[in-house]
Amino acid sequence: MYTEKVMDHFSNPRNVGEIENASGVGTVGNAKCGDIMRIYLDIDDNGIINDVKFKTFGCGAAVATSSMATELVKGKGIKEALQVTNKAVMDALDGLPPVKVHCSLLAEEAIHAALWDYATKNNIVIEGLEKPK
Ligand code: FES
Ligand code: FES
């Protein structure tokens, strides 16, 4: 049912934890199942995501997609991080079963919420970023 990459990121998730004094923190919940995810971003003066950590209280697919999403945004600029959509994360994991697609939305939403938090704290506008719900 799950691809090898999903199983790998589920059993050995990357970047689990938190960042003290993070540049941006995003917490989102999944309305469908009640699972929660929090992402911490450490963004330097050049707008590069130097570090990223996450905590997920959720299903295996949510853990695996968070883990992969953190790998995809680490070391990237803000613009590139915005391109890490749930589809990009699923592709990187070689797909998810259809009933688990909603789980991958958490990571995208949490990254966006963390970027929004960063933008708000620094009084900047990130083009293409919508206010989290
Ligand atoms: Fe969230 Fe399955 S419904 S753990
Ligand atoms: Fe809730 Fe996966 S079942 S995030």
Image (cartoon, rainbow, N blue to C red):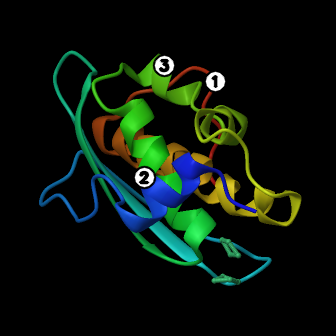
Residue located at (69% from left, 54% from top): 105
Note whether 53 is above or below 55 in the view shown: above
Q: Earlier in the sequence, mark 3 or mark 1?
A: 3
Q: Residues within 10 Å of mark 1 (few under 14, many from 20)?
A: few
Task: Kindly indicate the quadrant of the structure image that contains residue 59.
Answer: bottom right
Who is closer to the viewer here, 63 or 108? 63
Q: Marks 3/2: CA distance?
A: 17 Å
Residue picked out by circle 2:
67
Q: Please tell me whether mark 2 sits on a helix, a strand or a loop.
A: helix
Q: Earlier in the sequence, mark 1 or mark 2?
A: 2
Location of the N terminus (image quadrant): bottom right
Q: Residues within 10 Å of mark 3 (few under 14, many from 20)?
A: few
Residue located at (64% from left, 24% from top): 128
Residue located at (67% from left, 84% from top): 34
Dot in front, 1 or 2: 2
Three-letter amino acid code at the position of disc 1: Gly
- Does any atom of ligand 2 lie closer than 8 Å to the CB of label 3? no
Who is closer to the viewer here, 50 or 70? 70
Q: Residue furthest right?
A: 98
Q: Residue 76 vs residue 48: left or right? A: right
Task: Kindly indicate the quadrant of the structure image that contains residue 115.
Answer: top left
Dot in front, 3 or 1: 3
Residue picked out by circle 1:
128
Tell me where residue 60 appears, x and y as whole percent: 57, 71
Note whether 48 is above or below 55 in the view shown: above
Residue picked out by circle 3:
80
